Image (cartoon, helix red, strand yellow):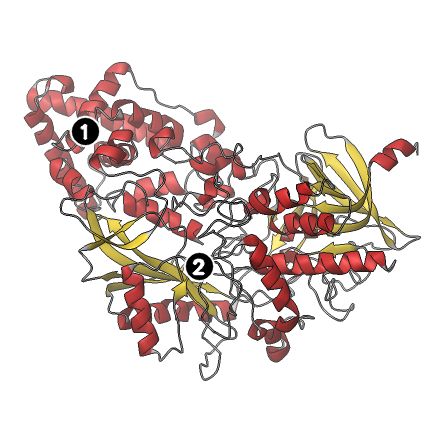
């Protein structure tokens, strides 16, 4: 091999971060701020903050197809089009499925965005802490392996993540959903206030409802503007009012002058050095030229999204690691989880006809988990939370009538009824047989093998969904809503875009891939701090936990590096 | 999560006035095979007819101009070509021809020569036909009914996302800057264009 030593020096950093989404951005920020020279590799295009959000200030009439997808977009995005996130206004965030195929042994909707910022640009921004209930559930009921971390250890890192990211919310003193370091909460609207009061009174505050805890700023924060109540977050925010890599972690990392970002860099595998028993660096395919190249570092943070990261680890085989890097436990690729949702209830609120809303709040309400806690016992394990809200919708009673003319126009330009909805988000248990593996019979655009996904919900999730509908209907009824309808629109893993697991943390190297510091048991200079690390998923939206775990792991990694333990 | 509300909100904002078929096509649905793109085409004359047709669905009123002024004559065929599978394009195009044939049969005039009263009468028939077909589930007038319901859906979609629809018929604020969840509803207040 002809090794250009100059090139090797040029391509050597203190740390490599694979991925630039929520957790990758945090890794880059923390590692550079602690003095390391960092290379952040992103497989997709660059997106500049503000100028890269071309549709952010567009009006509805500026879009050719009124926001809808063309047949051509549906052809190139056969997976992304399965649900609403992919639309005319934000089409550039979503991956061309034909270029990046995968195998569905069972249906799994894999939503992917390949660009600097990753899904931090498109995320739902709901930000909740896990609680000790969540960290202890695996040990208590025997599903999955015990978390190697408890809430007390993670709590200061949640504080740290919230203070930087800017999370607005209210303190509720609720055991399954701990309070944090919040910016002022957004307002509940008049119907939500009434529903909250009636639910909390009826259930004697054994169930509560609060405004969503959301990574949207309610006041200016660290040089970023506050939310303008446009509810167009998914196009990118020109005010920097929600947390994203671009608005938050990337500027902080760049300010250190120790960060290099390389877009169009697909990490094919991590290079393992059998002599040092550590990772030496990564092999990268340039997505534009197809050329391969190597980069080297003392530590590697893997933040390529849950399944992206696990693909890289499974694809990093060597004599010492024939089944994927750090996979002698056999757990790599297993225990894939996602939240199940798309069921709940909605109803109409009467008596508020003299009230309307001003502004478009990019947030809703949250009912934190109350099932299987204290005296509440269910015929399934774990539980769910509700997200939803009230809004005064436009007039909408005409599907069957097919009316037309000035009467229809008149009706369509008047505020309609108030309605209130509650949609459950349920925990899915970790099952060893829900797995991903590498399928060598297919190739992506760059000649890489693809991931195969074999994952399904089981009885525990199905039982829970019945309660997700019925509890919602019951609460809406107690809150005085009328014409209550329950719904279950069906759900497949992947749809919640909260895929987690497949490289779980644990204390025992025989049954887990990562230790309590998100460090590989078997390869001490590799850290995985995205959703892949999760031994269970609770029912809360997960990104805040990735932020806290990443900051904590980076702190540990740099300390170990300085002690020459890595 | 409020990503997740988005689709429902779009549906709400358009009113439940949009048919299930259109919701299916525009929000999830079908993929057109590579060799079947742009299956149908529409002439300038066709666009004029579609504009007149749409203007019966959303006419000019005191508050605001109607569908023709909002550009629906071009919007409808453009959406049909870009966003609908070939089978639906064909059905729509057949129904469109049947509309013109019905105009000749009923009034001995081509559609563009009809008075507003005649165009309205024709649409009353189409609506009755659509409701009857739904009840009987028969295949009678399948294409004509498909044309009517789809043109109506696209008119509502296009009109209420047009500048006239958003800013004149409804009220639109690009940057609200704040949220008030208990704002008094003023007499005659229009609904918001976006949610």
Q: Indicate left or right for A562 with A403 as reference.
A: right
The residue singled out by tag 1 in the image is: B66
Q: Quadrant location of the N terminus of chain B?
A: bottom left
Q: Chain of mark 1?
A: B
x, y percentage for residue A439? 69, 47
Q: CA distance from mark 1 to mark 2?
A: 44 Å
> As displayed, is residue A21 above or below residue A562?
above
**Numbered tag placed on residue A184 in the rendering:** 2
Q: Indicate left or right for B55 with A171 as reference.
A: left
**Numbered tag placed on residue A100 in the rendering:** none
Q: Indicate left or right for A235 with A525 as reference.
A: left
Residue in view at x 44 percent, y 59 percent = A184
Quick one: SS at disc 2? loop
Viewer-nearest residue: A14 or A7: A14
Residue, far top = B44
Quick one: SS at disc 1? loop
């Amino acid at each position: 091999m002809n090794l250009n030593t100059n090139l090797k020096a040029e391509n050597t950093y203190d740390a490599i971060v694979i991925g630039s989404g929520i957790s990758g951005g945090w890794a880059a920020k923390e590692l550079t701020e602690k003095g390391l020279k960092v290379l952040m590799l992103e497989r997709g295009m660059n997106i500049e903050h503000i100028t890269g959000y071309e549709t952010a200030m567009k009006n509805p009439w500026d879009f050719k197809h009124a926001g809808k997808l063309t047949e051509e977009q549906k052809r190139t995005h056969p997976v992304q089009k399965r649900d609403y996130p992919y639309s005319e206004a934000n089409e550039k965030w979503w991956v061309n499925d034909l270029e990046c195929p995968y195998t569905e042994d069972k249906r799994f909707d894999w939503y992917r965005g390949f660009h600097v910022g990753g899904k931090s640009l498109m995320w739902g921004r709901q930000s909740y802490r896990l609680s000790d209930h969540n960290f202890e559930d695996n040990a208590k009921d025997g599903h999955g392996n015990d978390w190697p971390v408890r809430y007390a250890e993670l709590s200061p890192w949640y504080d740290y993540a919230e203070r930087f990211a800017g999370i607005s919310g209210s303190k509720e003193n609720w055991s399954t959903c701990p309070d944090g370091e919040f910016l002022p909460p957004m307002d509940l609207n008049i119907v939500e206030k009434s529903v909250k009061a009636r639910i909390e009174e009826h259930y004697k505050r054994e169930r509560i409802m609060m405004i969503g805890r959301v990574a949207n700023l309610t006041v200016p924060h660290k040089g970023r503007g506050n939310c303008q109540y446009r509810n167009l977050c998914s196009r990118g925010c020109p005010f920097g009012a929600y947390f994203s890599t671009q608005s938050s972690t990337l500027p902080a990392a760049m300010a250190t002058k120790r960060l290099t970002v390389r877009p169009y860099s697909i990490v094919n595998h991590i290079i393992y050095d059998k002599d040092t028993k550590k990772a030496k660096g990564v092999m990268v395919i340039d997505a534009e030229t197809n050329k391969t190249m190597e980069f080297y570092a003392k530590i590697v943070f893997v933040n390529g999204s849950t399944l992206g990261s696990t693909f890289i680890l499974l694809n990093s085989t060597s004599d010492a690691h024939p089944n994927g890097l750090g996979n002698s436990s056999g757990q790599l690729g297993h225990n894939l989880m996602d939240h199940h949702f798309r069921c709940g209830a909605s109803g109409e609120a009467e008596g508020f006809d003299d009230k309307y809303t001003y502004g478009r709040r990019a947030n809703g309400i949250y009912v934190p988990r109350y099932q299987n806690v204290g005296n509440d016992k269910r015929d399934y394990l774990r539980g769910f939370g509700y997200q939803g809200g009230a809004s005064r919708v436009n007039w909408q009673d005409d599907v069957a009538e097919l009316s037309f003319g000035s009467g229809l126009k008149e009706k369509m330009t008047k505020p309609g009824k108030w309605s209130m909805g509650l949609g459950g988000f349920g925990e899915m248990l970790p099952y060893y047989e829900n797995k991903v593996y590498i399928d060598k019979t297919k190739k992506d655009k760059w000649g890489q093998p693809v991931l195969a996904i074999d994952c399904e919900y089981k009885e525990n999730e199905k039982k829970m969904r019945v309660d997700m509908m019925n509890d919602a209907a019951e609460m809406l009824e107690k809150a005085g809503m009328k014409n209550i309808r329950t719904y279950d629109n069906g759900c497949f893993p992947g749809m919640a875009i909260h895929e987690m697991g497949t490289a779980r943390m644990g204390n025992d190297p025989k049954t887990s891939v990562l230790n309590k510091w998100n460090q590989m048991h078997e390869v001490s200079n590799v850290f995985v701090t995205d959703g892949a690390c999760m031994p269970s998923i609770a029912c809360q939206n997960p990104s805040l936990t990735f932020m806290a775990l990443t900051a904590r792991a980076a702190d540990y990694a740099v300390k170990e590096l300085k002690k020459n333990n890595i | 999560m409020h990503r997740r509300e988005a689709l429902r909100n779009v549906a709400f904002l358009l009113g439940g006035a949009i048919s299930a078929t259109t919701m299916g096509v525009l929000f999830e649905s079908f993929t057109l095979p590579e060799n079947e793109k742009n299956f149908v085409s529409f002439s300038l004359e066709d666009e004029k007819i579609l504009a007149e047709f749409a203007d019966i669905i959303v006419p000019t009123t005191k508050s605001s101009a109607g569908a023709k002024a909002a550009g629906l004559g071009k919007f409808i065929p453009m959406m049909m070509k870009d966003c609908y599978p070939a089978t639906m394009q064909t059905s729509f195009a057949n129904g469109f021809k049947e509309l013109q044939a019905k105009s000749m049969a009923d009034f001995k005039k081509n559609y563009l020569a009809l008075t507003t009263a005649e165009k309205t009468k024709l649409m009353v028939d189409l609506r009755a036909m659509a409701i009857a077909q739904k009840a009987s589930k028969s295949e009678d007038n399948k294409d004509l009914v498909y044309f009517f319901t789809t043109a109506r859906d696209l008119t509502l979609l296009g009109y209420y996302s047009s500048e006239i629809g958003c800013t004149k018929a409804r009220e639109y604020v690009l940057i609200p800057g704040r949220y008030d969840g208990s704002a008094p509803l003023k007499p005659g207040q229009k609904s918001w264009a976006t949610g």
